[in-house]
Image: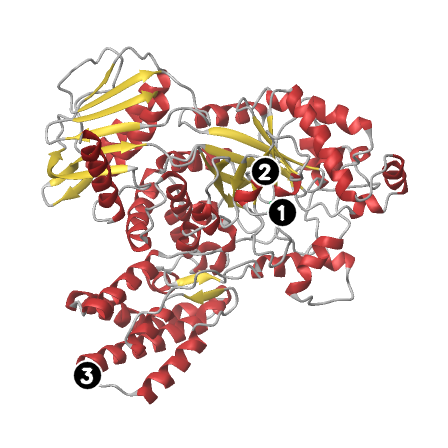
Amino acid sequence: MKKIILIALLFSCCIAVNGQQNTLNLMPVPKQLTAMSGKNRITNKFTVSVQGNVADTVLFKAVNRVYQNLNRKTGLAFGQQYITPTDKNDSASLIVNVKTKAEAGIDVNESYSLKATEKQIVLNAVTTIGALRGLQTIIQLCDKDESGYYFPCVVIEDSPRFKWRGLMLDVARHFISYEEMKRNIDAMAAVKMNVLHWHLTDDEGFRVESKLFPLLHQKGSNGDYYTQAQLKEIVRYAAERGIVVVPEFDMPGHAQSWFAGYPELASQPGPYHPGPRMQWQKEHPEIKTPPVTSIADIVANMVAPTFDPTNEKVYDFLDKFIGEMAGIFPSGYMHIGADENNGQAWKLNPKIMGWMKQHQMQSTDDLQRYFVERVYGLMKKHHRTMIGWEEIYNDKLPKDAIVHKWIPSDNSMIKSYGMANDIAQHNPVLISEGFYLDLFLPAYIHYNNASIAAANNPNILGGEAAQWTELADNNNIDGRIWPRAAAIAERLWSPANVTDVDDMYRRLYVLSNELDEQGLNHLTNYERALRLLTNGEPTEHLQVLTDVLSQVKGYRKLVAMMMRAPQASYQTTPLTSVSDVILADPATKRKFRALVKLYLEKKDKNAEEAIRAYLQTWKQNDTYLQPLFAGNKRLMEVQDHSKNLSAAAAIGLEALDRMDKGITDAAWVQKQSDVLTVFEKAHYETEIVVIPEIEELVIGHTIAKPEKYSAF
Ligand code: ACM
C-alpha cells in the first residue's frame, strides 16, 4: 500500500512538471516541483545561515553572491553585511544545509532539495556543488507582484538527467577575452551547466601561453592568448561555480597555428601562419562563386595543415605539451579535436606514404587511427581521459576514450560515424549534434534535439552547446550563445518529459533579462551596436525593426566569408553589420507568436488588442525610419525589410478586421499569402521572422513550426 501511495505521489509530481503549469520561472525545470499556495515575502530583514560544519570557502562565497544578488534585485538594503560560518541562526530567512564539501567534477553529487514556506526557505544538499545548483534555483524563484518581492512557496527535489552539460566555446577564430569568459561562466552557472569545453587552438590561433614551447603562442597567435596565470584563474573561477574546464588542443588537423612556430611537426613544409585554412581564392582563383554544395568536396579534398604522425619528434613534443597543460587544467579530461582530417597532406608526402606501406597501412584512416592511439597513450601517461570529435571513433578505440558526436546523423553533407546510441555501445558519448548555436537556429530546434530525445544508453554522458566563432567576437559573443544555450542546458538537466516549447520560451526570456541584469552583455551589446549603426542617433525605431529580424539560418554567411579569404577573412571583417549584432531568436517573435496562437485558438480579445498594437507599430515604423536611412549605407541592407514589414503589418491588420467582421474570401487570402511569401525571403543576411504569424492571421489558423532547417 505504502508503495502504491509513493508511486501515486511520484506520478502526481511528474504530472505537475509535465502539465507545465507549475514551472514558475525556473530554467532548467527541476526534476520534481510542487508549487504550493502562499508567498514568502522578502523584507530588509532577510537573513541567511549556513548550517552544519562544512568549512567551505566556495560555499560561503556562493551564498554571499546570492545574498548580494537578491539585495540588488529587491533594492531593500538587507541588514546582514555578509554571511560567515559563525552566523548560526535557526530562524534565518534562508537556511543552507550541506553535508560534505566537494569540488566541481563530472561525477559529483549535484542533487539538492528545497522547501520554501511563508516563514523560511531551507536548502538541503549532500555536497557543496548541489548547494550551488540549489542557490541558482533560489535566485530564479525570486519574483515580484504589486506588493513587492517574494519567493513562491514550493517544494523541490532536483538532480540532473545528464552528468555532462557543457558549453563548447571556440576562442581560436576570434579571441574571446578573459573578462568575457568569466561573464559566460556566470551565465553557465545560472543554468546549472557544469563543463566549459574551451576550444583553445585551431588553424586561426593558438590561444594558450606555453612556457615550454613559447613559439606556439608567440607565432601561432596575433598576440591574443591567455597567460598561464589567466588560464589558472579561469579554472579557479569556474570551479567556484561548480564548473570544470576541459581544454581542447586540435590535432592532427585544424593545426596550422602549431606549425607557425614549429613547422617541423607538420606533414608539409612551411612556412605556416595562423589563419583560415580554407583559402578558396588562393587555391581556386578560376572559380569566382562556387556552389555551396561544393563545400563538402573542398573539405574532402583540400590540403590542410596536419601533424606528421610518422615523426617521433611529434610525440615527444606532444608529451611535453600535454604534461604542461595537465598542470594548468586539473579536470582529468582533455579534448584532442581530431575532426575533419581528410588525409590529403599525408597523401602528398612520399615519406609518409612510404612509412604507411612499411607498416601495412591501407589508408590514411589507418594512419589517423595510429595517431589517435599514440596520443591516447600520452593522455594516459598524464592521467587524462581523452576526448575527440566523432572522427576518433572506430572499433579498436580504447573503451574509455570519449567520442564527441557532432555530425548530423542524416548524413546530409558529411558522413556520420553512427548514431549516439550505437557509438555508446562501445564508448562514452557526448552529443553536440543538433546543438550548434552558430547555425542561428531558434532555441526550440535545439530544445527538441532528436539525438538527445532518443538517448537510451547510460554511456551517453550528456552533451554540449557549441559556439564556433568565425562570425562572433567579444562584441557579439554573449548574444550568440545566450539565451539560446539555456534551452540546451534545460534539455540536458531536466527530465525528458519536460517538452512544452511555449512554456520554455516564456521562461527563456525571463531568464534572458535576468542574465543581462547579472552582467552578461547579450542585450546590452545589441543596444550598443544599434547606436553604432545609427551613428549615435536614437535607436528606438531601428530596434522596432531589428527586434523582428534574424540571421539567415545555417552557414550561408560563413561560406560567403570563406570564399573571400584571405583578402577579407572572417577574422578581419568587422562584425558590426545588422546580421552580426541582432539576436538569433528574438523575444518579440516568440511573444507575438504566443499572442497569435492565443487569439486564433481561443479568440482571446486581449491578445487581439496586443496583436493590433504590434501591427500598428510595425506599420508606421518605416515612415519613422526614413530620415535615419537617408545617407546611412550601413542600414541599406534593411531598407527593403522595413518597407515589407510595414506592408505585412497592414495585411495583418486587415486580416484581423476581416475576421472580426466574419468575411471569408479565398481569393484575398491567396493574394496576401503570395505577397507574404515574398516578404519572407532574406535580404542580404537577415530575414523578417514574424511573417509566418501574419500569414496565420491571414489564413485564420496556426501553422506548425518547421522541425529542422538546412545548414547550407
Ligand atoms: C566540428 O564542427 N568540426 C567539430
Which of labels 2 and 3 is toward the front?
2
The numbered mark at residue 378 is none
Q: CA distance from mark 1 to mark 2?
A: 10 Å
How crowded is the residue under tag 1: few (<14 C-alpha within 10 Å), some, or many (20+)?
some
Q: Position of residue 178 (x, y in %)?
A: 50, 33
Residue type, mark 2 in image = Val
Residue type, mark 1 in image = Tyr
Residue type, mark 3 in image = Gly
Q: CA distance from mark 2 to mark 3?
A: 58 Å
The numbered mark at residue 417 is 1
User: Residue 49 falls in which quadrant of the image?
Assistant: top left
Task: Read off the residue under disc 3.
Answer: 662
Which of labels 1 and 3 is toward the front?
1
In the image: residue 538, left or right of residue 320:
left
Given residues 74 and 55, the one toward you in this image is: 55
**Disc with the residue nearer the chain's start (1 vs 2):** 2
Q: Position of residue 538 (x, y in %)?
A: 35, 59
Q: Are marks 1 and 3 in contact (CB under 8 Å)?
A: no
Task: Read off the residue under disc 2.
Answer: 403
Q: Coloured how? A: secondary structure
Classify mark 3 as within 8 Å of ligand 1 or not, answering yes or no. no
How crowded is the residue under tag 3: few (<14 C-alpha within 10 Å), some, or many (20+)?
few
Q: CA distance from mark 1 to mark 3?
A: 55 Å
User: Residue 414 falls in which quadrant of the image?
Assistant: bottom right
**Disc with the residue nearer the chain's start (2 vs 3):** 2
In the image: residue 275, left or right of residue 179:
right
Q: Residue at x 74, y 34 (%)?
A: 371
**Disc with the residue nearer the chain's start (1 vs 3):** 1
